[in-house]
Amino acid sequence: MDEFVNSSIIEAKERIKQSISKDVIIIFFTRLLEDLKKNPNSDVFGRVMEIYYFFKPYKKANKTEIYDFFTSKLDQSEGLILDEYEKKYFQIIFSEINPNYKFKNGQIMKGRIKGMLDKITLKYLPNTSKITNSYIIGKLICSMGGLANLVIKPSSTIQLIGSEKSLFRHKRINSKPPKYGLLYYTEEVQKSKNKGKTARQIANKLSIAIKQDYYHNFAR
Amino acid sequence: MEPKDRNQKPDIRHPTSEVRRPTSDIRSQTSDRWDPNTSKWKAALEIGMDVKLKGTENILYLGASSGTTVGQLSKLTTGYIFAVEKSSNMAIPLIRLAEQRNNIVPLFVDAHDIEYIKSKIKDFKIDILFQDIPSMDQVEIILANSTLVEKKCKILLSLKTLSISKAKKEDIIKLEEKKIKEYFSIIDSQSLEKYHKGHTFFILEKKK
């Protein structure tokens, strides 16, 4: 092959590597937590496959190769770049997974993964972590498919994420509109007497905080 | 076409994340069939426009996505194909294709960034400029990129009117043609309604 074509391929790979954003890690941890909450003995190969795609996007691999990749060496040459802390978290998690992709003790790992998620959101999204807990932030990001999509949306959309069924029913049949979606499960809304009002207030503050964090940490 | 069933449930997406993968793979990029329903270039060929390749051209392809058309074109020329794509989800299969073939040069850059493209083209002479980017400023992009090519170069534009506005197709085309006629002369323009809804295909040439 030509030198010209080769050098251009290498340069394109470098540029792609710089453009992969870190909210992929947040999405991975929240989806693991979600699965473990439903069933501590569940199969996690699908989640692992999704994040393997960001480490090595140019190759296809078997189940055993992926397992070896995560337990022995985390090669950061072609994809995601990890800190030392994030590397430790990955090593801890994958030391607790069997080769058939099930956790040895799912109940204990729930608490540990929640702790890791807290630290990661505190590092990358400090302003939003003051408002709600990390699990709900992760679920909001997952539902939109990334932080870059969530930043653009208005606060009324953030208020109603998770209640799409009742929202479209309201539009179709003119039934009562929903007041809250995922935000129902926050502490403030559970305790308050006027739940719709607090959900709206939290969504307003969240949308400001997400923009602060995104343009400070993630955007270029 | 059958009428829409109003009793169908709406397309609800439950709150989960999606790792979007493009549908094309090495198999579809290098297969023998070139499908006019997914490729604008082939649709123009089927209608009868003058877009056939001679065999030695260098092509600048804006909006390459995952490389279905680019893979077919690389079989038909011996020159280089400069494939420009902005999204990382789509550029990864394109790079996998470029590793297999010999003459694809992938450029992971926005089509507005002309200085980078100019620094990568260097001294190569470009014979065809093709654009397939669905955005509001399609015409401005091709105006800016036409400064990189000479006067003899053939310029092909696939215009998607829905991404400009929801008005009627004829009104939008009139407005855009006014902008185009300042700098280009239109050799041919036909609608690709048979294969792609809402697209028109232009063959242009630089005036100066």
Image (tube, coloured by chain):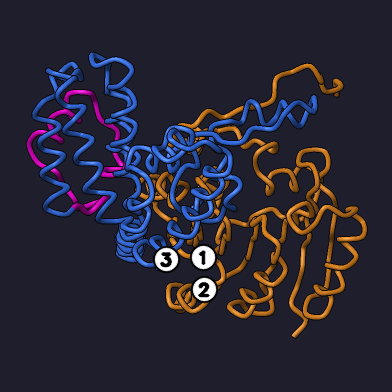
Q: Nearer the viewer, residue A195 or B40?
A: A195
- Left or right side of B161 for A85: left
Tag 3–tag 2 contact (CB < 8 Å): no
Which residue is denoted by mark 1 in the rendering? B110
Query: Is disc 1 surrounded by few (<14), some (14 to 19) or many (20+) residues within 10 Å?
Result: some
Tag 1–tag 3 contact (CB < 8 Å): no
Q: Secondary structure at mark 2?
A: loop
Question: Toward which corner of the image does residue A1 lie, by quadrant?
Answer: bottom left
Q: CA distance from mark 1 to mark 3?
A: 20 Å
Instruction: Say whether mark 2 and mark 3 are on the same chain.
Output: no
Figure colour of chain B? orange
Q: Chain of mark 2?
A: B
- A99 shown above or below B133: above
Residue span colored magenta: A54-82
Q: Position of residue B68 (x, y in %)?
A: 54, 42
Tag 1–tag 2 contact (CB < 8 Å): yes
Q: Position of residue A90 (x, y in %)?
A: 16, 39
- Left or right side of A108 for B84: right
Q: Which chain is blue?
A: A
Q: CA distance from mark 3 to mark 2?
A: 22 Å
Q: Nearer the viewer, residue B170 or A25?
A: A25
Q: Nearer the viewer, mark 1 or mark 3?
A: 3
Which residue is denoted by mark 3 in the rendering? A215
Residue A61 lies in magenta, yes or no?
A: yes
* Residue in the image at 58% along x and 39% along y: A196
Which residue is denoted by mark 2 in the rendering? B113
* Residue in the image at 43% along x and 35% along y: A191
